[in-house]
């Protein structure tokens, strides 16, 4: 396997890092890429006002989520005492992957100084080095000269790559911009959301009054990257249905953005939140983690993001439905069910029905849900049966 290793302080990880990682994956044809946040970088002092190692790790994980399944964040430098020497990291990785080929990725600043690093010779014997320019103005020729020097002096495997999209930014500059309320255009949204939620780098957003991109960023920072397209799809669909059926599009948007924010919380986290927010659970809910995220999501939407009650109740009921659903509850329920990323037999029919008969679509969604539970041998929550019977009854009386 060809494995890339991209180390850094990642304080915070920004779009420059992300573009470099993406380009290296393709240009070097890597099978895997490890992102390795340093605990104590040997080459620079940790800045005052920076984030702690665990927060840097969490932000790097969020960036990795946007880079695909071959990218992994390793915490091996975080739990090592003293300075985070690349040579120690490579020795460890070499033991774990004795037959694989390593390539260290680095921008000009690191590439030009690697011969001065601790145990440079050993580093260059354990891994190849791929250098790239960080800004348009950096001289590609200088990189070539250094590549030649490293090869001639150490017999190192060296290459230079040209990034197709250079993002001229450094973490230092970004920390400064963030403290002034700027810089979000240089951050992957889930990383930006993490920064806002944890008030890193002097940010002090009022989470109860975020604009839409900020609210999306916060929501996306709470889930796995693979869920983001679904959340975006549910948001757009909910807004469209609100416009079609006369609900408030802003409330529909907020409900769509936040509806799955606690989706990946563990059973323990869900139960702790239920206890903290006084959410009572029935017997089925106590053992079914999938039913809990709607309830805890509603509580977080209310408490952290200041969502109005209509939005919270739409989130609360979006998994099971209930009798007497409000218009917004119906809209979120069905938007979640059939947004454009969903793909199952009958989804097109369901989508078409939402344009002409919202209640009919919700009823069909509920019936499909009942059938699915039956087919899988899963117990059905009684609220879903109640919702179905209520809608059926309504239609019989029309
Ligand atoms: P700081 O401003 O705190 O020095 P940084 O932006 O240089 O931070 P690091 O985490 O120290 O970020 O960098 C890790 C690696 O990413 C280094 O190899 C660095 O050269 C590279 N790198 C940093 N910024 C960019 C960028 N904008 N484009 C490409 N590579 C970058």
Image: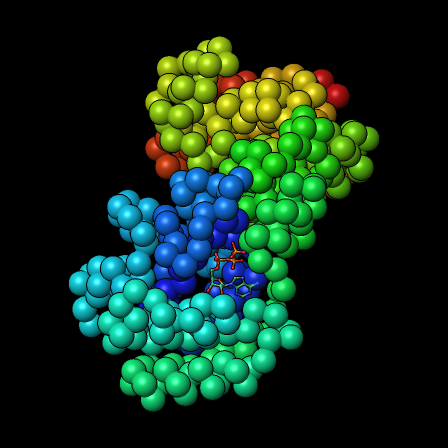
Work out whether residue 72 can be spotted. no
x and y, in percent, of residue 83 in the image: 31, 52
Please, is residue 47 above or below residue 117 in the view? above
Q: Residue at x 81, y 30 (%)?
A: 246
x and y, in percent, of residue 179 in the image: 65, 41
Work out whether residue 28 can be spotted. yes
Comparing 341 with 324, the one in front is: 341
Please, is residue 334 above or below residue 20 in the view? above
Comparing 391 with 260, the one in front is: 260
- Exactly how many numbered labels are in the figure? 0
> Can you tell which quarter of the image residue 138 is in?
bottom right
Decide if residue 353 is on the left or right side of residue 125.
right
Comparing 366 with 163, the one in front is: 163
Q: Residue at x 39, y 37 (%)?
A: 375
Please, is residue 333 above or below residue 299 in the view? below
Q: Residue at x 61, y 51 (%)?
A: 174
x and y, in percent, of residue 333 in the image: 61, 32
Q: Quadrant of the N terminus?
A: bottom left
Q: Quadrant of the C terminus?
A: top right
x and y, in percent, of residue 383 in the image: 52, 19
Decide if residue 84 is on the left or right side of residue 51.
left
Decide if residue 346 is on the left or right side of residue 253.
left
Q: Residue at x 65, y 16 (%)?
A: 324
Comparing 218 with 166, the one in front is: 166
> Can you tell which quarter of the image residue 313 is in?
top right
Report the coloring of the rendering.
rainbow
């Amino acid at each position: 396997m060809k494995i890339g290793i991209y180390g850094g302080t990642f304080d915070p990880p920004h779009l420059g890092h992300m573009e470099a990682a993406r380009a290296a994956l393709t240009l070097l044809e890597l099978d895997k890429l490890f992102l390795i946040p340093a605990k104590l970088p040997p080459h620079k002092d940790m800045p005052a006002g920076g984030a702690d190692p665990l927060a840097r790790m969490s932000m790097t994980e969020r960036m990795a989520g946007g880079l695909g399944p071959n990218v992994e964040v390793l915490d091996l430098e975080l739990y090592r005492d003293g300075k985070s020497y690349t040579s120690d990291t490579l020795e460890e990785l070499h033991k774990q992957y004795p037959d694989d080929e390593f390539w260290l990725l680095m921008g000009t600043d690191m590439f030009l100084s690697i011969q001065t690093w601790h145990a440079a010779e050993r580093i260059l014997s354990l891994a190849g080095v791929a250098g790239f320019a960080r800004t348009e103005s950096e001289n590609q020729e200088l990189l070539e000269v250094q590549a030649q020097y490293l090869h001639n002096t150490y017999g190192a495997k060296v290459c230079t790559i040209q990034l197709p999209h250079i993002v001229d930014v450094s973490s230092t500059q970004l920390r400064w911009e963030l403290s002034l309320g700027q810089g979000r255009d240089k951050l992957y949204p889930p990383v930006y959301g993490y920064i806002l939620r944890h008030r890193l780098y002097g940010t002090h957003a009022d989470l109860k009054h975020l604009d839409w991109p900020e609210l999306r960023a916060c929501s996306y920072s709470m889930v796995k990257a693979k869920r983001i397209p679904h959340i975006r799809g549910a948001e757009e669909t909910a807004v469209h249905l609100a416009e079609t059926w006369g609900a408030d599009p802003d409330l529909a948007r907020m409900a769509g953005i936040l509806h799955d924010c606690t989706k990946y919380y563990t059973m323990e986290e869900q139960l702790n939140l239920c206890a903290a927010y006084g959410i009572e659970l029935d017997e089925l809910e106590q053992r079914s983690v999938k039913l809990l995220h709607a309830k805890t999501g509603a509580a977080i939407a209310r408490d952290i993001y200041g969502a109005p009650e209509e939005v919270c109740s739409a989130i609360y009921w979006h998994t099971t439905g209930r009798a007497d659903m409000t218009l917004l509850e119906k809209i979120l329920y069905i938007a979640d069910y059939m947004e454009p990323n969903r793909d199952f037999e009958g989804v097109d029919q369901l989508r078409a029905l939402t344009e002409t008969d919202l209640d009919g679509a919700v009823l069909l969604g509920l019936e499909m849900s009942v059938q699915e539970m039956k087919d899988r041998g899963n117990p059905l929550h009684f609220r879903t049966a109640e919702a179905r019977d209520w809608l059926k009854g309504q239609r019989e009386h029309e």
